[in-house]
Amino acid sequence: MYNNEYVKEYIELLLKDEELYFKDYLSFQDKISRSNAIYKGEPVPALYQGFFYSEEEKNNFINMSNILVSITRKITEAYLNNSEFRKLFNFPKELEELILHNPGYDIPAPMARYDMLYGDKENYKFCEFNTDGTSGMNEDNIIGNLLMETLAFKEFKKKYKLNNVELFTPWVLESTNIYKQKYEKKPNIAIVDFLDLGISKEFDEFKNIYNKLGFNCEIIDVRDLRYLNGKLVYNNYEVDLIYRRMVTSEFMKNYGELTDFIKAYYDNAFMMLGSFRSQIMHSKIIFTILQNDLTKSYLNDEENKFIDEHFLPTFILKNEKDIDILIKNKDSFILKPADEYASKGVYAGRDFNDRQWKEKIYESLNLNYIYQEYYDVKPLSFVEFTNDGHLEVNDFTGVIGMYMYNEKFIAPYTRIGKNATVGGKGNYYSAPNIYIK
């Protein structure tokens, strides 16, 4: 069974006593407001429902993930071994050198979240890859646990076995296992980011799990690390393994003041998960490169067919021809910066009138933007309560990310919305993963 089939049963349950479940919904919202499910200083918005998926749907996600892992490996190998292929990415020299450096393991993206507009197993299109600074685990698990304690879910659990898959422990286990493949010692671990930009509550939970499993772990701003006597250190804490949360674009903006870190990286004074090689798939430019004939020559027929059928056609915004296409087809495209995150600077043509859209296009020109075809995905059904407690069932656009740790599928991460774009502060609801048996 798939999400919408479970939703039908869930709706029937709620309709038996709308007043009871509305009161419980209000209590659920109050608990979220007092929890650590915080995004940019505000409670993460959520509905009285999660994203339901069965073993059958999980297996579909696993199959998709396996194809993406194979594509990721082949594209990374092509980048490392073919200087002509590297030119397609147009990365600055400093970043290219960081990518080419051997990080001490062969996994291109140890942690990833592959995001797609998803309706069901036949109706989906990949829209971006988060292989760099992947996040969202905290909100999914906190809201998921609160949802599991609602009256509706307690009743639903009388028929089904429900599980909000925990997203922290699997990464702690996989990351330390990768380290153990190369080193015998137990590592001192650091979660590293620009801490004024990172998601501190999420870092705290990862640190707690590392500690519970017997590992030293500190949360450190990359600018505070020093390279002394062959060791990367923070005060007196020697770092062996870094769980990297800083995105490469922010790292490169601060490249000039990170000389200690960069020297230690080139000297392999520590292991970093993920390495800078994750940027190859993280940059949205990859969606244009996957359409290139040279790229196709590295992939097999199944992989190329998968890309043709399930990837959004994507183009670089570079000249008047592109501008003309975008102006004449306003509702058919979405503009995205090639290397931003958290939905910054994303514009869907259908959100603007003709004049506004033209302004957005010209504002984006020469700012390293791509444009993708807009995909009207088959909607997902979710319940909502009106202010007076009436139950409604409404259609939402679903963006589902597949969490991958050490190239293994863990669980989906689901955001839903009614606008032309889904994501960013105030523009989505979090729908926790609910695995049903």
Image (cartoon, rainbow, N blue to C red):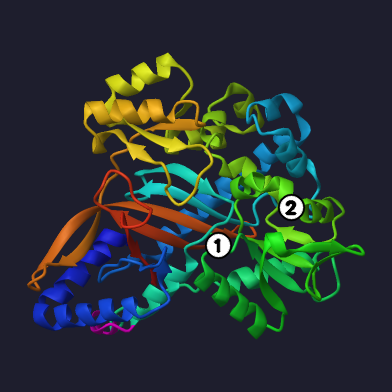
Question: Dot 1 corresponds to which residue?
Answer: 196
> Does residue 437 show up?
no
**Count of residue discs:** 2
Q: Residue at x 17, y 57 (%)?
A: 394
Q: Which span is picked out in magenta? A: 149-155
Q: Is residue 238 left or right of residue 127?
A: right
> Does residue 430 show up?
yes
Q: Which labelled disc corresponds to residue 35?
A: none
Location of residue 116 with respect to 49 vertically, above or below: above
Alpha-carbon neighbours of circle 1 within 10 Å: few (<14), some, or many (≥20)? few
Give the overall secondary structure of the magenta segment.
helix
Do tag 1 and tag 2 residues touch (Cβ < 8 Å)? no
Q: Residue at x 25, y 47 (%)?
A: 419
Q: Of callouts 1 and 2, which one flags the residue occurring earlier in the amino acid sequence?
A: 1
Q: Nearer the viewer, residue 266 or 101?
A: 266
Q: Residue at x 44, y 73 (%)?
A: 141
**Residue 193 place in picture, x, y as percent:** 62, 61
- Among the 4 quarters of the image, the one containing residue 9: bottom left
